[in-house]
Amino acid sequence: MSDAQDKILDIISRVCKKERMTLSKDTDMGDLDFDSMTFVEIVLLMEEELGLTIPDNDLALESFRTVADFEAAAVIWKQR
């Protein structure tokens, strides 16, 4: 697991108040009481802790169904 993937799991764990050990890349965000406020908090922490700049047009809540979706997006955002 890369450092970025590990940090993303840590961020989601903190924001969603779930044990880190219970999360995987396949974890369904719906199972974590994921809503728009949770989404914004995760994205802001990703920008801060991973040094990303996330374009507003990439922020579609429905595009982030699993932890893996956040990981894939982080790879794309890092390349920009």
Image (tube, rainbow, N blue to C red):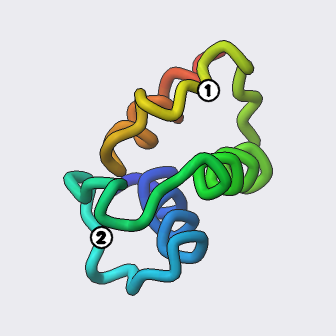
Q: Earlier in the sequence, mark 2 or mark 1?
A: 2
Which mark's residue is nearer the viewer, 2 or 1? 1
Q: Answer with left or right where residue 13 lies relative to residue 49.
A: left
Q: Answer with left or right where residue 64 lies relative to residue 42.
A: left
Where in the figure is residue 32, as x and y percent of width and height?
38, 67
Q: Give the number of the disc on residue 23.
A: 2
Give me the residue at 37% from left, 37% from top: 69
Looking at the picture, which amino acid does disc 1 mark? Leu
Give me the residue at 40% from left, 53% from top: 2
The relative height of residue 7 versus residue 26 in the rendered view (above or below) is: below
Where in the figure is residue 40, as x and y percent of width and height?
69, 47
Residue 30 versus residue 66: which sits nearer the camera?
30
Sort mark 1 into few (<14), some (14-19) or many (20+) by Cα contacts within 10 Å.
few
Q: CA distance from mark 2 to mark 1?
A: 22 Å
Residue 65 versus residue 24: which sits nearer the camera?
65
Q: Give the number of the disc on residue 59.
A: 1
Where in the figure is residue 3, as x and y percent of width and height?
49, 57
Q: Answer with left or right where residue 40 lies relative to residue 64.
A: right
The relative height of residue 20 versus residue 6 in the rendered view (above or below) is: below
Where in the figure is residue 58, as x and y percent of width and height?
60, 19
Give me the residue at 46% from left, 57% from top: 34
Residue 1 versus residue 9: which sits nearer the camera?
9
The relative height of residue 60 versus residue 34 in the rendered view (above or below) is: above
The relative height of residue 29 versus residue 77 in the rendered view (above or below) is: below
Please, what secondary structure does the residue beneath circle 2 have?
A: loop
- Quarter containing the N terminus: bottom left
- Quarter containing the C terminus: top right
Image quadrant where residue 65 sits? top left
Image quadrant where residue 23 sits? bottom left
Looking at the picture, which amino acid does disc 2 mark? Leu
